[in-house]
Image: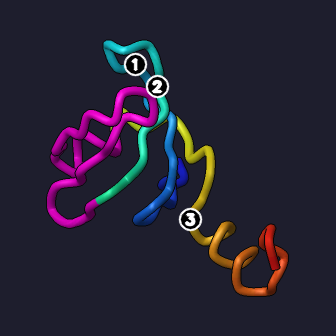
């Protein structure tokens, strides 16, 4: 099975939703533990990396894609 690729700033979908009703989380800190912030209610949780990887469903929006869009001048307002 292929290991999912994720990085700082990505918005990911978890297998189970947060109590507020959304299952979208943004990765805001990476290390041995990963801190994720709920996109809906902005609550953050520190999760061990192994548990995070088992609960991760898929990466919805990658931070690398948004950085590339901003770097080539296609951002709104320019």
Q: Percent position (x, y) of residue 24?
A: 48, 33
Of all residues, the one furthest to the front in this rendering is: 77
Of labels 2 and 1, earlier in sequence is 1
Of labels 2 and 3, earlier in sequence is 2
Which secondary structure lies at badge 2? Answer: loop
Residue 63 image label: 3
User: In the rendered structure, are the residues bearing label 2 and label 1 in contact, judged by CB atoms less than 8 Å apart?
Assistant: yes
Above-or-below relation of 40 to 33: above
User: Marks 1/3: CA distance?
Assistant: 22 Å
Res 29 quadrant in image: bottom left
Q: Is residue 61 left or right of residue 14?
A: right
Which secondary structure lies at badge 3? Answer: helix
Q: Percent position (x, y) of residue 32?
A: 15, 62
x 50%, y 56%: residue: 10
Q: Give the quadrant of the C terminus.
A: bottom right
Q: Please identify, in this view, whether the residue under mark 1 or under mark 3 is nearer the observer.
A: 3
Q: Percent position (x, y) of residue 49?
A: 23, 51
x 36%, y 15%: residue: 20
Compare residues 62 and 74 and report the one nearer the observer.
74
Colour scheme of the rendered structure: rainbow
Provide the residue span drawn in magenta.
Answer: 29-53
Please count the marks in the image. 3
Of labels 1 and 3, earlier in sequence is 1
Q: Percent position (x, y) of residue 5?
A: 51, 60
Residue named by callout 1: 16
Q: Is residue 60 left or right of residue 51?
A: right
User: In the rendered structure, are the residues bearing label 2 and label 3 in contact, judged by CB atoms less than 8 Å apart?
Assistant: no
User: Marks 2/1: CA distance?
Assistant: 6 Å
Residue named by callout 2: 23
Res 16 quadrant in image: top left
Res 18 quadrant in image: top left
Compare residues 59 and 25 and report the one nearer the observer.
25
């Amino acid at each position: 099975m292929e290991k999912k690729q994720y990085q700082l700033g990505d918005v990911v979908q978890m297998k189970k939703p947060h109590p507020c009703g959304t299952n979208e989380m943004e990765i805001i800190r990476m290390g041995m533990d990963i801190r994720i912030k709920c996109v809906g209610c902005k609550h953050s949780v520190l999760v061990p990396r192994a548990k995070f990887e088992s609960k991760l469903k898929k990466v919805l929006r990658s931070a690398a894609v948004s950085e590339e869009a901003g770097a080539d001048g296609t951002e709104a307002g320019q």
